[in-house]
Image (cartoon, coloured by chain):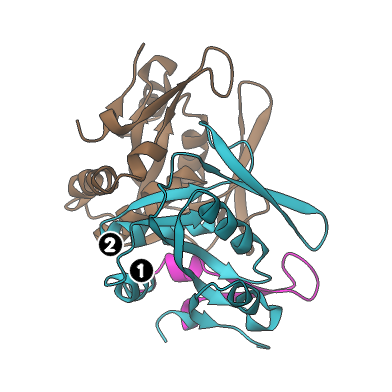
Chain colours: A brown, B cyan
Amino acid sequence: MPIKSRIRTIPHYPHQGIMFRDITTLLKDPVGLRATVQEIAQRYREMKIDKVVGIESRGFIIGTPVAYELGLGFVPIRKPGKLPSETVGRDYDLEYGSDRIEIHVDAIQPGERVLLVDDLIATGGTAEAAVGLIQEMGGIVVECCFVVDLPDVGGRARLENLGQKVFALCEFSGE
Amino acid sequence: MPIKSRIRTIPHYPHQGIMFRDITTLLKDPVGLRATVQEIAQRYREMKIDKVVGIESRGFIIGTPVAYELGLGFVPIRKPGKLPSETVGRDYDLEYGSDRIEIHVDAIQPGERVLLVDDLIATGGTAEAAVGLIQEMGGIVVECCFVVDLPDVGGRARLENLGQKVFALCEFSGE
């Protein structure tokens, strides 16, 4: 397991009871970074992807080398006010309060086949909002791809219930 | 100029009088992303770099594919409170107020040769703080690498006055 074994767990971060899955130990290792990017790229090489979209900011770290390896362009989805040109945005609920993500209106053309990438799926709220933004622009989300899935938290099921395909390189469940 | 010509200028963002250099148009173009990563990687392939460090968050977008292409690991420098394990941090001045960046204490080993990457150098304040953090951990900053240099703002001269080497793929000056 070149990938899962290189992910570090930080207990009680950022809150008591949370087991935080830290991918920085995976990324700083040349073998870990290479395996992560190549496993993802290998899966999508024949799926006729037009563009890779990554969610700020750990999704940038995974999504950009995947786009590069596949010979595609990369589009960032960012927190509010971070993108300089015209955007569309979407609000979504958090455990406490809400948040918002935005994308440039000219980032995706109607009919483009998009791979959505983030480091981790937990509740799936951010990913659901991102899927909505891509669809609002006429893009087709081919699959939602993560390094880590936390199946106990339900995000994969939430996206699959929306008709989305979900892929993750590894899972952490009750460990 | 496959790189400079793909960077979009947004006048008066985020403030009146600022010409914002927007690399999202470069990155979403497969030719632009590929040329950016390969030009940088080509420069450093023979320089015995051990690790690539990128500054949150556009530095992640450039730094990670460069690390991947060079077969190296990637280390993020982040805003306060974003890294889950033990960190060291450094405050630096902004035009109005101050900011802070942090790095994991176990991210760099003493003597490692580091390439520091960000999308753009303006005043150089963030880059100077990042160089200080890497040096505090015993790392050697081989060069500070940017996609865009704004020479009129003085960041390159500031870093060079500290003894740092600076490289940028393109410059915008009074345009």
Q: Which mark is residue B69?
A: 2
Please identify the quadrant where the N terminus of chain B is shown.
bottom left
Q: Please provide the residue range marked out in magenta.
A: B5-34
Between B90 and B121, the one nearer to me in the picture: B90
As helix, strand or loop, the secondary structure at mark 2 comes to: helix
Relative placement, left or right, of B47 versus B174 is left
Q: Chain of mark 1?
A: B
Residue behind mark 1: B37
Percent position of residue B100, x then y: 68, 48
Residue A74 x/y as whole percent:
40, 59
Q: Amino acid at mark 1?
A: Val
Mark positioned earlier in the residue sequence (1 or 2): 1
Q: Is residue B31 left or right of residue B168?
A: left
Q: Are marks 1 and 2 in contact (CB under 8 Å)?
A: yes
**Disc 1 to disc 2, C-alpha distance:** 8 Å
Q: What percent of the width, then of the height, locates residue A46?
A: 16, 52
Q: Residues within 10 Å of mark 1 (few under 14, many from 20)?
A: many
SS at badge 1: helix
Classify the position of the C terminus of chain B by image quarter.
bottom right
Residue B58, compared with residue A175, is above or below; it is below
Residue B49 visible (yes or no): yes
Residue A109 in percent (x, y) is at: 43, 61
Q: Tell me where residue A39 sits by quadrant.
A: top left
Residue A122, magenta (yes or no) = no
